[in-house]
Amino acid sequence: MKFDIIFSIMAIREIEFFLKALSILKERGYPNVDFITFHEAEDKILEKECIPYFSMQKMAEIVDIKEKGVALSDKIESNYGIASIRSLFTHDRFTSNKKKRVNY
């Protein structure tokens, strides 16, 4: 699927803003807006609102974690059509102080 806009949610407080933006964007002719989440709490909020999203947390549970770095990023980009996913992983790791977790 081709997306017009993908919001990357790094913190729960961002969801309120992006949910308001979502309705405005759809009214203005951008029907293909999606979300990428990094935390279970964000997933729950979007599920409650019946809004589709791509969960990095859930994806990490099903992807072979032995695969790292560029190989993992390339696999996600090709399977899900999300460009530049590695920069989002890196941003999440450093803003959340997850330096010891999976090396994306």
Image (cartoon, rainbow, N blue to C red):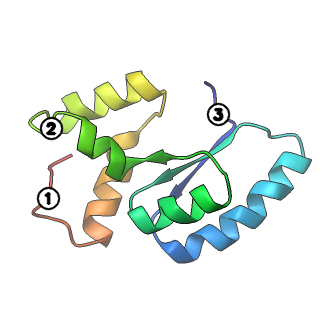
Q: Residue furthest bottom?
A: 13
Of the residues under marks 2 and 1, which one precedes in the sequence?
Answer: 2
Question: x, y (%) of residue 38?
Answer: 39, 58
What's the CA distance linking mark 1 and mark 3? Answer: 29 Å
Of the residues under marks 3 and 2, which one precedes in the sequence?
Answer: 3
Q: Is residue 31 above or below residue 20?
A: above
Residue at 24% x, 35% y is: 63
Kind of residue indicated by mark 3: Phe
Question: x, y (%) of residue 51?
Answer: 65, 50
Whether pointer 3 and pointer 2 mark residues with C-beta atoms closer than 8 Å, the reply is no
Crowd around label 3: few <14 · some 14–19 · many ≥20 (10 Å): few
Image quadrant in which you'd find residue 95 = bottom left
Is 37 placed left or right of 52 in the picture? Answer: left
The disc label shown at residue 3, or none: 3
Between 17 and 91, which is closer to the camera in this rendering? Answer: 17
What residue would you read off at disc 2? 68
What's the CA distance linking mark 2 and mark 1? Answer: 11 Å
Pick the quarter of the image with the N terminus. top right
Residue at 88% x, 40% y is: 29
Question: x, y (%) of residue 97?
Answer: 22, 72
Residue at 40% x, 62% y is: 40
What residue would you read off at disc 1? 101
Q: Is residue 89 visible?
A: yes
Whether pointer 1 and pointer 3 mark residues with C-beta atoms closer than 8 Å, the reply is no
Kind of residue indicated by mark 1: Arg
